[in-house]
Image: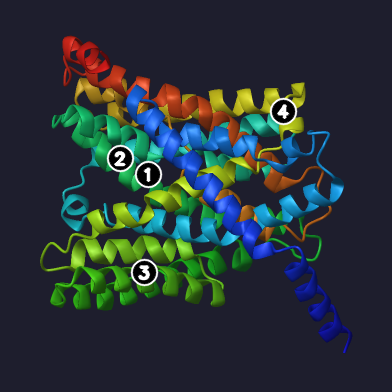
Amino acid sequence: MDYTNNLLDLQNWMMVHHRSYKIIFIIGLLLLFIFLIHTFTEKFRLPSVAGYVLVGTLFSSSLIKQIPFFSEEFIDWYAYLINSFDFVTILAVSFISFTIGTSLSLKVLKKMETEFTLIILFESIGAFALVSLSMLYIGKPPYLAILMGAFATATAPAATVLILKEYGVQGIFSATLMIVLALDEALALVIFSFVEPISLITIDPAQALNIVNGFILPLVKIISAAGLGLAIGYVSQRYICFDHSKKQKIFLILLTVIGGTSLSIALHISPLIYNLFVGFAFCNFAKRHIGVADLIETLTMPLYALFFILAGTKIQITNIFTSSFMIIALIYTITRLIGKIGGASIGAKIAKAPNSVQKYIGFGLMPQIGVALDLAYIVQRDFAHITNTEVDVAVIIFNIILFTSLFTEISGSAATEFALYKSGEVKQRKVYNKRA
C-alpha cells in the first residue's frame, strides 16, 4: 500500500512540474548547440568531440550550482533531468561498439602478421602497466590504479580516421595504423571485462577474490556475450541481405542493436562485447555489401553528439581545479602517452616493421574519448552501491577521462598529421595547403 501511494505521489509530482516538457526543452537546446558546434568545428577543422564535451561542461550540475539566482529546487530538478538521459548513453555506447565490430574483417585478421600483434599487445600492456604503477606510486588504492590502467588501454579511432580519410593516404604506415586502431578497441573491451570485476571484488568486503570470480566468471560472460552477438548478428545480416528496402534495413539494425542490448543487460552480460560481435558478424558473414556503415553514420551522428555533451555534464568543476586532481591527470596523461607511443614503437621494432612504422605509429594512438567513456558509464553503474571507498570512483574517472581527452583530441589530430608527414605518406606542402 505504501509503495502504491509513493508511486502515485511521484507521478503527480512529475505532472505538476511538467517533467516531459522540460526534457523536450533540454533536448531542443542541446540539438541547437550540436548544430552550432558542428558548423564551427567543420569550418575551422577542429575536433567536434572536444567542442561537445566543452559545451556539456557548461551544462554540468556542478557549474549550474554556482549560479546564484537559481533556486535549490531548480538545481535539484535540473540534476534529476540530466541524469534521466542515461538511456542515451546506453544507446550510444551500443552503436559505438557495433561500429568497431564492423571494422574487424576476417580477411585482415587472417593476414595479420606478427607486426600487428606485437604493436597492439605492447602499446596496450605498456599503457596499462605504466598508468597502474604510477597511480600506486602516488598512493592511490589498487582497485583505482588497475581501473585507470584499463581505461588507458582504450584508443579513440574517430579523430585519427578522419585525418587519414582527409588526406586519402594508402601507404604501409596508414594501413598499419588503421588495423591497429580497430583491434586496439576490441582488446581494450576485453581487458576491461577482466579488470573491472577484479577491482569491484577488491573493495567489496562481502567478496573474496579467487580464480572463479576473478577469471572464470568474467571469461564465461565474455564468451556468452560474444556467442549471443555472433548468433543474432548472423541471423540479422541474412535478413538484411535478402531485403533491399532501406527502411527495413534501418528497422532491423535498430532491433538488432537495441533489442540485443536489452537482452544482454537482462542476462547480466556485456552489451559492449555483444554489439562488438554483432558488428563482426555483419562485416564477415554477409555475402554481399549491405551498406551498413552509411546507414549507421546517418542514424547515430546526433546520438553520438548528445552522448558526448551528456558526458561533459558529468565533470565536477569544483574537483578539477585542485592541485591533487591536476597531479593525477598530468601523471595519467604522461604515463598513458609513454605507454602507447613507446610500447607501439618497441612492438614494431621487435617485429622488424618498416622504419616509418617503428618511429611514428604511436602518434596515431593518442586520442581516447569514445570507448573510454562507454566504460566510465559501466563503472558508474557497477560501483554505485559501493560506499567504503576513499573517493567516488565514477566521478574521478569521468573527470580524468574527459579532462585529459580535451588535450588528446586536439593534440592527437596534430600528432597524426605529423606522423603522416614524417612517414613520407603526406607531403609538407599538402599539409599547409589543407590548412589554408
Query: Which residue is label 4 attached to?
Result: 325
Based on the displayed image, in which of its 4 quarters is residue 249 positioned? bottom left
Query: Which residue is label 2 attached to?
Result: 180
Whether residue 104 is situated above or below residue 156 in the rendered picture: below
On the rendered structure, is 306 left or right of 187? Answer: right
Label 3 and label 4: CA atoms lie apart by: 40 Å
Which amino acid does the dot numbered 2 rest on? Val
For marks 2 and 4, give the one nearer the viewer.
4
Question: 10 Å neighbourhood of mark 1: few (<14), some, or many (≥20)?
Answer: many
Q: Earlier in the sequence, mark 3 or mark 4?
A: 3
Which amino acid does the dot numbered 3 rest on? Leu
Q: Residue at x 15, y 54 (%)?
A: 107
Query: Which residue is label 3 attached to?
Result: 254
* Residues at circles 1 and 2 in contact by the CB criterion of under 8 Å: yes
Which amino acid does the dot numbered 1 rest on? Asp
Secondary structure at badge 1 equals: helix
Whether residue 15 is situated above or below residue 93 in the rendered picture: below
Q: Earlier in the sequence, mark 4 or mark 1?
A: 1
Label 4 and label 1: CA atoms lie apart by: 28 Å
The x, y position of residue 62, in whole percent, is 75, 39
Secondary structure at badge 4 equals: helix
Based on the displayed image, in which of its 4 quarters is residue 70 positioned? top right
Q: Residue at x 32, y 38 (%)?
A: 118
* Residue 154 appears in the rendering: no
Determine the residue located farthest toward the right in the rendered image: 2
Query: Which residue is label 1 attached to?
Result: 184
Which amino acid does the dot numbered 4 rest on? Phe
For marks 3 and 1, give the one nearer the viewer.
3
